[in-house]
Amino acid sequence: MDWRINYYEAKYHLSIANRMFRTYEDYPEKRILIGAIRELSESVEKIIQTFLIRDKVEDELKMFVEKIGPKYMDETTLKNIIQILKIKKDQESAKVEFTKNSCLLLFSDEKWTILKLSRLKQFRNSVKNVIENFRQI
């Protein structure tokens, strides 16, 4: 499989997430923020697949986190990317979720997760940097 397909799909999902963040600023509804998280997560999954295919590694997240990710990106960016996947998992299993004052609150696995819009935008910027710098890597 060609890594370019996943690369362009990662860019596509990031562009949708960007539009959803802009829409959220005008219409602060929970479903828009949830959609942005899902699109960011899709983008992360595609960019991870891109790295795995390009480096000819089997489809394994653990291998990406331990070997491939640290080789191509700084620690903060790698942590942010993995955190996006964790947030998506928490959101999918959340029993309660709501927004208040530009924060998304999730109750999942008997604990609360509070995500500020500014933190979600930091995650988005990490994904954007990885995608933009992928060709230079």
Image: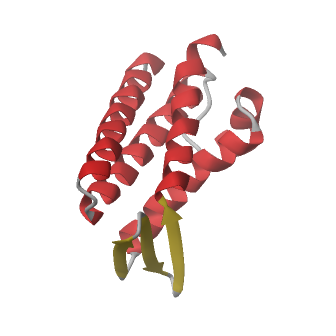
Q: Quadrant of the C terminus?
A: top right
Residue 30, compared with residue 2, is above or below; it is below
Nearer-the-camera pick, 4 or 104: 104
Q: Nearer the viewer, residue 71 or 112?
A: 112
- Of residues 46 and 130, the one drawn nearer to the viewer in this rendering: 130
Q: Nearer the viewer, residue 28 or 70?
A: 28
When the figure is inspected, residue 39 is found, relative to residue 6, above or below; the finding is: below
Q: Give the side of residue 86 with respect to residue 22, left or right.
A: right
The color scheme shown is secondary structure
Quadrant location, the N terminus:
top left
Q: Quadrant of residue 77?
A: top right
- Camera sees residue 113: yes
What residue is rendered at 38% in x and 73% in y? Answer: 100
Q: Residue at x 50, y 46 (%)?
A: 121
* Left or right: 12 as drawn, with respect to 84: left
Rendered residue at 49%/40% (across/down): 44
x and y, in percent, of residue 24 in the image = 30, 52
36 left or right of 26? right
Give the x, y percent position of residue 7: 44, 23
Q: Position of residue 50 (x, y in %)?
A: 51, 27
Q: Is residue 16 above or below residue 7?
A: below
- Extreme residue toward the top, this view: 136
